[in-house]
Amino acid sequence: MSLGLGILACLVVVVLRSAGYLQFLELGSYDAYLRVRERHTVPEPRVVLVQIVEGDIQRIQQWPPSDDRLADLLEAILNYHPRVIGVDLYRDFAVPPGTQRLNALLANNPSIFCIEKFGDAAGGGRVLGPPALRGTERIGFSDVTVDSDGVVRRGLLFLDDGQNFSLSLPLRLALTYLARDGVSPQAGEPNPEYLRLGPTTFVPFEGNDGGYVGADAAGYQYLLDYRGGVKPFTTYTMSDVLDGHVDPALIRDAIVITGVNSVSVKDEFLTPYDRFASAGQTTSGIAVHAYEISQLLRAALKGDAPIQVLGDRFENLWVLLWGVLAAILGQFARSGLRFSLFAVGGLAALVAVTFFAFIQGWWLPVAPPGLAWLTASGVVAAYLSNYEKTEKKLLMDLFSKNVSPAVADELWKHRDSFMQGGRLEAQTLPITVLFSDLANFTPVAERLTPTELLNWLNEYMETMASLVTQYGGVVDNYIGDAIKADFGVPVPRTTEAEIRQDAVNAVSCALAMRGQLEQLNEFWSAQGSPQVRIRVGIATGSVVAGCLGSTQRIKYTTIGDVVNTAARLESFGKEAPGSSPDTQCEVLLSDRTAECLGDRFELESVGVASLKGKSEGVMVYRLLGEKQPAAGKIATPVVVANR
């Protein structure tokens, strides 16, 4: 049942995940893992940024910069001999003066690449590249894929709307840089339709990859890994370059990207680094392109593959695995403290496993299995708690009024040994049965009114039943003025010592009844109430113990030959040889009970008796007293618990 509930909880989580309700948690875990993995900055020397900042705009006193100003900047950069330059500024129309000069510079320097905006599938928002480069392969699109929460987590390699096909600026720059190292685009392995750079094949992103649900997978996308940490790129301003305040060695043979990074001109995005940073922190567009270029170079030259994901089927199995584990293991975490430790420990293990996988290049679901873990364990805990409450209520309804608190606790602690399926399981137990009955009840009943009789009888029953409880017994039944008590139920006794102790407890209880009856008779005599005698029969042996009755009324009881023997011994007390009418409490024992007592009590042999309903005679003993009572009192009972 617990496993079924756990699986059901997992299926609910899978449905929620498939509907996209957990995507924000999944993307958040991706950002958190990436940020922790890249907590140390590792410089990327192959990419240099030249930013046009607010101070540069104030210096040139215009935006966008004129063609002349842009030509000045590009010529200054060219003087440092970079391998390739990317211009992340739209230049679809002239910004005089200096237009002819800029066009000539672009046309005559094959290492300079500019941008266009590809726009949407319908052609809306399209911005063309510079006129001087149209028709060449030195224009790349600058479009960026932004998730619903505003964070850029995916890079673009190609876009194709059926009429236009274009490569991204980062891919253009990376391919130009890699060409000198002999690396060019190749057919993927094992799928030749995929792009391969060096040893790395880029598997196209699908809309449900990783934590995504129904994401826009247009074009050829891949997951960005943002290696290098925060700000791994050497960065200069436009003024630094124009004034010569740069280190030529850092620019030589590098990829230089120039673009704007100013508060007055918005070209900024959120990255996983910005999500957990101070409010308002963003990353410039040229820096996002730089991260893409760095990843492409590492993939081609070092074999660093993009982050991989499992398919939907395996991701759902991953979620199911954690839920099933929670359902199975959660059955052993029943207390509040254990459940808390279990829940927290499971989540910690999940985070450790998934983070290790992330370091190895795999993005495994975190939030869904975590939710499945908590949900499954919580449902199982709630079910078990309710189940245990039902069991405990049943157990306490049967025993709580008839046993001591210590015995009740032992019953609950060891319930698994005698409870199955929410009810007590029938079992064969070695016990000692005690029957007591009033010897002259009828004359007493005739002297009292009904109310007086019940009050008098309840006082007697309350006193004797409390003694049974005190000595570790269970009051099985009240039969008129008779009491049936069992010593050794319902927790099974497994050793001979425990069986003997039950017999000792029963006999000690009988002696306590004798002493208590003497006090009651003195009290009743002083009040003018009738006095009584009681007979007690005690037998030890195996019985069948379990619940009898209907679903509306059920009780725990014992049946068997030993029960009959104890009842017959009580009745035999009327005619047993040596019985005295002056004895207030006659106690007769079976031979098996006598054997269990050792030499602790004084016994008198009555002889072999033919008891009613017994085909063979039974050796009977009379209880005289305890040989060495402590300080004149009945010895303290020992309640035997299950070992």
Image (cartoon, rainbow, N blue to C red):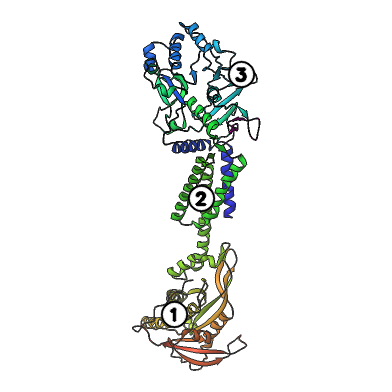
- Badge 3 marks a residue whose secondary structure is loop
Taking the spot 47% from the left edge, 86% from the top edge, the residue there is 587
Q: Earlier in the sequence, mark 2 or mark 3?
A: 3
Of circles 1 and 2, the one toward us is 2
Q: Residues within 10 Å of mark 1 (few under 14, many from 20)?
A: many
Of circles 1 and 3, the one toward us is 3
Magenta highlight on residue 10: no
Magenta stretch, main secondary structure, is: loop
Identify the residue position indicated by label 2 in the image: 378
Question: Which quadrant of the figure has residue 187?
Answer: top right
- Badge 1 marks a residue whose secondary structure is helix
Which residues are drawn in magenta?
A: 187-211
Using the image, tell me which numbered label, if any, was put on residue 571: none
Q: Position of residue 163 (x, y in %)?
A: 64, 18
Q: Amino acid at mark 2?
A: Gly
> Alpha-carbon distance for marks 1 and 2?
46 Å
Q: Amino acid at mark 3?
A: Ala
Question: Which quadrant of the figure has residue 202?
Answer: top right
Of circles 2 and 3, the one toward us is 3
Q: Is residue 264 above or below residue 295?
A: above
Residue in the foreground of this view, choosing between 235 and 254: 254
> Alpha-carbon distance for marks 2 and 3?
50 Å
Identify the residue position indicated by label 1 in the image: 509
> Alpha-carbon distance for marks 1 and 3?
96 Å
Identify the residue position indicated by label 3 in the image: 122
Q: Residues within 10 Å of mark 2 (few under 14, many from 20)?
A: some
Quadrant, the N terminus: bottom right
Q: Position of residue 325 (x, y in %)?
A: 55, 52
Q: Position of residue 377 (x, y in %)?
A: 52, 51
Taking the spot 55% from the left edge, 92% from the top edge, the residue there is 608
